[in-house]
Amino acid sequence: MEAARDPSVEGADGPRLRRLSPEGRQARISDLVLDTGSMSAQELSEVFGVSVMTIHRDLDELQRQGVLRKARGAATDAETRTCRGAFDTEMIAAVHHQK
């Protein structure tokens, strides 16, 4: 799977992304995930030119702050995930009620 390409992140800024502080990179990760809905750790690693483990540490911190949700190697918008989780819970309850 090829990494998502965001023109605001790549191009002329490409080499500078590797020099971002962890806080700067986390802010950009947050913007990307909120704009796209979700991105894998591998995609983010390719976009920012850092290791997947570095991205996992960034995602852990963003999840701790309540900005994003991390699940199965991907990050999702915390609010979207929460809304979907509530919807899924209601659907499961409705299915069980019908039985």
Image (cartoon, rainbow, N blue to C red):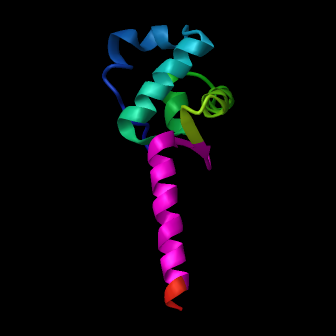
Q: Residue furthest front?
A: 97
Q: Quadrant of residue 52?
A: top right
| 74 drawn magenta | yes
- Whole-percent x and y of residue 72? 62, 50
- Whole-percent x and y of residue 53? 69, 31
Q: Residue furthest left?
A: 7
Say above or below: 9 vs 38: above
- Magenta part of the chain: 70-96
Say above or below: 47 vs 76: above
Q: Residue furthest bottom?
A: 99
Residue 77 visible in the picture: no
The residue under the point 49% across, 36% down is 43
The residue under the point 54% across, 75% down is 93
- Whole-percent x and y of residue 36? 37, 38
| Number of marks drawn | 0
Residue 2 visible in the picture: yes
Say above or below: 10 vs 69: above
The residue under the point 34% across, 27% down is 6
Residue 27 or residue 3, whichever sits in front = 27
Residue 5 or residue 59, whichever sits in front = 59
- Whole-percent x and y of residue 28? 46, 20
Q: Quadrant of the C terminus?
A: bottom right
Dominant secondary structure (helix, strand or loop) of the stretch shown in magenta: helix
| 4 drawn magenta | no
